[in-house]
Image: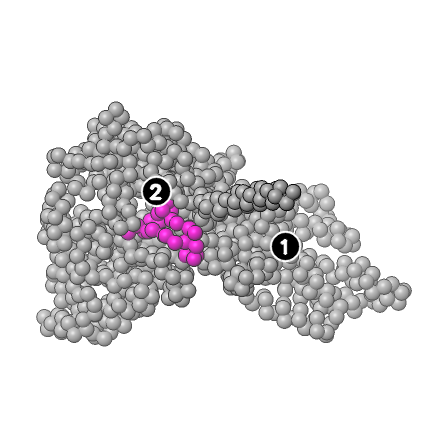
Amino acid sequence: MVYMKVQTLGKSVAVLAALALAVGGTVVSANAATPAYIDCQNFSAGEPDHIDPALTSTLVGANTATMLFDGLTDTDAAGNLYGEVASKWTTKDGAKTWVFTFKKNLKFSNGEPVLPSSFVNGWKRALDSKLASEVAYHGDFIAGMNAYSTGKAAFPAASVVADDKAMTLTTKMENPTADWPAIVSHSVFSPIPTSMIGASGKIEEDGTKLVGNGPFMLDKAITKRAGGEVVIVPNPNFGGKAASLSKVTFKIFSDVNAAYNAFASGQCDNGPIPAGRYTELLTKWGTKGVKTVLGTDYWGFNWEDPTVGGTKNKLLRSAIAKAIDKDQISTVIYQGIRKPASGLLPPGIPGFKAGQGLTDGRDLVGAKADYKKWLALGNKTPDAIRLSYNDGAGWDKVASIIVANLKDVGIPAKLDPFAADGTYFSKMRSGKGQIIRGGWFADYPIADNFLYPLLHSKTIDGDNLERYNSKAFDALVDSARSSTNKSFAQSQYRRAEVQALRTDVVMVATVNRGVAVVLAASTSTFPITPLGMIMFDQIVKN
Amino acid sequence: MFTYTIKRVLQSLIVVWAAVTLMFALFFIIPGDPISLKSGEKSLPPEILDNIERKYGLDKPTYVQYFRFWGNLFRGDLGYSYKNDKSVNTILSDGLSTSARLLFWGALFQLIIALAVGLTSAIKRGSLGDRIGTVFSVGVQGIPVFVSGLLAQYLFGVLPFQLGWDWLNFFKPWPQSWTLGIIPTDSWKGMILPALVVAVVDAAFIARMLRSSLLEVLRADYIRTAFAKGLSARRVWMHHALRNALIPVVTVYGTSLIAIFGVAVQTEKVFSLPGMGSTIADSALSQDAPVVLGLSIVVISFGAFVNLVVDLSYALIDPRIKIESKAVH
């Protein structure tokens, strides 16, 4: 009887233990479910212009677009170019023609296969003059594409040839373009499914029509964007490594302070840092979300200005360049987030070499010596040199530091703010500035993307705000652009950088740009690419 | 009354037309244009800018754009945003519900606060309650919305979260689902802070106006008579005094309902609510004319409507006021 009772008891205990394990297992399983992520920093300064990769012209819009669409290539967090849809790329005729071989069995979120023709369809749409994309000009590297994007000719089918059977895409370039594999990583070159062929720019209003092949897809119709958020969920048909998040919600704010407060009150997993609070908040939340990115702030000299421009005023420019205290700007204005720049190219650009500028830090003795030499050539103390900048964006603080720095040398200078009506850059392009506030953020991680648009003589009236015109510089950059020998090209770009910054002193790079985001303690991995893109598919949240 | 109403409606339509025409003209007068604004730190090639101009019809003469705008408007099409190609109709419908709810609750809280503070101050004149009401009226009026909004976020959001007092944490997302259009059924806390911020700006002023008006009415003979007849204080206050004191208060309240739009714009911006106000503000900065004009038509029409309702309400509040279309003989 006792034995039977013990047996019964034993069985009961065993059953109870099994039940306990089952319940415990369920609890453990529930805890192991992928977490959702709420982002309050990407759109902390307002609704993105677009998240359609064919149309977005902002970093934040492009960041979302790259989560929805995978291109031929991309850049990882370490700055390495890798194949997303392309498994390899080759050129056999000196970078005039490139052949991309595709990975197999990749699909869009609607199940449609990703084929070379998907890219042709995407480029036809994105570069069509009727779509009027602001970023269509990136297609000008392709032979005949400029005429198409300006409405003067049909799509250059002979320049973009898709072979869906061989799974190859062949592109013919307007000029030899050694950097084409990096350039084609831009979101404008994304593929589209057949349902998006010929779609207008209004396709974003119904998110179900914006169909991509990236690690995420839109969760709901984009009209929800006006409701203050964009929601993306993992693409079930994604051919790469699945995201570790079940959902990413991008909350849209129109005030950075409100966005930070939302993070600090527990609404979000990350948040922006309002201006002037970097030290305080990074001390509080940690620096996991900080990264130097491929952007540089600079002050350029109007090459055509009689006081500061041309070869005859090189010593004055040299004195000004040496007088500027980059460390002070970095520490006082940016609290170390933007680090002092030693050249125009930021660290992370292939072929980058530190110290390409005139000086790494402030050289007050050298500045005074150069200024004295310039005066000794018969020049008189100039009228206060104008530091031109767009008002209302905080540049007055940087300009004020520079004015004080120049005063130490005896060079008179004054602030020259231009109204915050959006016309600053067009006025600088027409030569109205003297020392010009400028800045550049890379479209793709190549040296050419800085040096050519900012300083080549062909870009005067464009991004060459200084109206710099140097045959020596042009020759160096042109030779680099047409070479497929990476080492040679990189050395030519470095020489061009020295020509512009040290020999001609056409500009002074002050700081390299940085991204700074505060993260909740639950975020253990937060990868950011050198282009400032957050890789949401690789975020790990505990 | 009917003739007067029709006349006022026609006047309102002329006001709306004139205001919108003026705004339309301003977009051509102010420096810069929305297309060249797209060419910021990175220049856009001239051909790209031409493409964009053609897309939005900005290459057409001004008068063609003007008449096309009104033609589209009569067809119910408010155009498309220069910034993101979004239909202004969609922006309006998305934003209108948020703004309307914020305005409704803000106006309601404003009325409740104003009545509570104004009545207390008048009834308990000279008491501690009156003094607190005065301090509130003077103090709150001077605080800009962006300060009060951020302060409210900190005091009722950041600080409670840090202390673990979620019951005091009112800084939550704006509600996504509503019953009867105005009653939040989820995240109701997210509606409270923005509505209160909207409410307090003019509540203080209205409270002071009500207090002054009540004190003046209380000096009238008929009030003394009412008390002498043995009516309760509550009846005298609510039925006789308050009703007569409301005339100037209603005027001010009506004006504040129009002014509340400006407050709501700032509040929407500070709290990042997806309303019309913040959209107008952001669109004005980027010279996104279709959005600004389209939403402004709604705002201006609302203002004209409120003015009309205020005028007509006088006759309802005080039957002695008759709205006459002929001269009084």
Circle 2 Cα neighbour tier, 10 Å, few/some/many (<14 / 14–19 / ≥20): many
The residue singled out by tag 2 in the image is A66
Say whether residue A541 is magenta.
yes
Chain name for mark 2: A
Region in magenta: A519-542
- Disc 2/disc 1 C-alpha distance (Å): 43 Å
Reply above or below: B76 against A248: above
Chain of the residue on which disc 1 is drawn: B
Q: Quadrant of the N terminus of chain A?
A: top right
**Amino acid at dot 2:** Thr
Which disc is residue A142 wearing?
A: none
Nearest the camera: A190 or B50? A190
Q: Position of residue B226 (x, y in %)?
A: 86, 64
- Label 2 element class: helix
In the depicted structure, whether residue B217 falls above or below residue B85:
below
Residue at image x 85%, y 64%? Answer: B232
Instruction: State left or right for residue B117 relative to residue A56.
Output: right
A458 in the magenta segment: no
Question: Up-down: is A298 above or below A93?
Answer: below
